[in-house]
Amino acid sequence: MSITAQEFQHFRKFLKRSSGIALADNKQYLVSNRLRPLLKEMGLDRVSDLLAMIAAMPTCDLTAKVIDAMTTNETFWFRDTSHFQYLETKLLAMLSKKGAPLSVWSAACSSGQEPYSISLSVDKYIKASGKQVKVSITATDLSDKTLRQAKQGIYADMELSRGLPNELQREHFSGVRDGLQISPRHRARTSFRKLNLLDNFSTLGQFDIVFCRNVLLYFAGPTKLDILNRIVNVMKPGAYLFLSSSEIIPSEINGLETIRDATCKCYRKI
């Protein structure tokens, strides 16, 4: 499937308007590759036909399907391992000293590997320390498709092989018809909901820990700053923020200090 320069520009504007995602000038090939299956499914030949159909039927779920196609990425268990090591060996102990329940937000949870990795780390901490800590995890994403899988917590062998140690698979997963399902304890600890980070998320509550990794790179400067400022606003004093290892907090963002621990870098709200 080919895409003209004009179609690409029109699609870039549509995607930014509907999701906030800013495509770089050289991502024409990505649009072509990601939308090809959807165009085939819809019986359409060109991206311009797709945009025309969306404009003609704005209430249909086609926009959501386009966003799903453009945001679906490979995800891993315990991605950026140092974050989870810091969580289970130091951070949970520090934050749970007061005995209050802890709230965690996984801001781009995809198909569930990140929030369930957080939950597995909580169990590892409890087992290693002998101390109980109550943790609730709020997991959000823009994609309906990935959220459906995340809520079920069912994964194929190939999905489980991407970063999940065998001993955790044996201990925390059981066989079901479509694969292996994470145990009810972790599903009960984690609540999923659809959220566009462009929208107001102040109603999610206040959090002790926020994971917002590998998502801000999709947004242009002013939009990224707006999202980060609003994330800081839902963090409790002393809360921690994890970005991906390749991301840094822009100098325009106030109220955070950088925390470095061995190979782990995160940010704490002052």
Image (cartoon, rainbow, N blue to C red):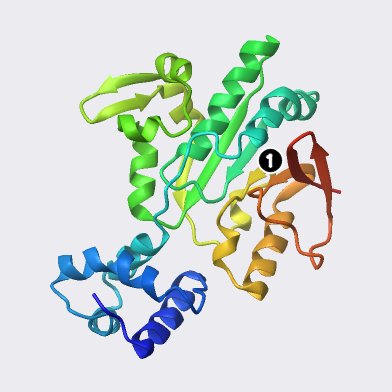
Amino acid tagged 1:
Ile
Per the image, the residue denoted by label 1 is 209
Of residues 225 and 167, the one nearer the viewer is: 167
What residue is drawn where x is 43% and y is 34%? 162
| Residue 160 percent across, percent down from the top left | 39, 30
Of residues 194 and 172, the one nearer the viewer is: 172
What residue is drawn where x is 80% and y is 25%? 98
Occupied quadrant, residue 33 = bottom left
| Residue 213 percent across, percent down from the top left | 59, 50
Q: Residue furthest bottom?
A: 6
Of residues 147 and 165, the one nearer the viewer is: 165
Label 1 element class: strand
In the rendered image of this protein, does residue 234 appear above or below residue 51?
above
Of residues 161 and 179, the one nearer the viewer is: 161
Q: Residue furthest top?
A: 130
Would residue 172 be found to the left or right of residue 60 on screen? right
| Residue 112 percent across, percent down from the top left | 44, 40
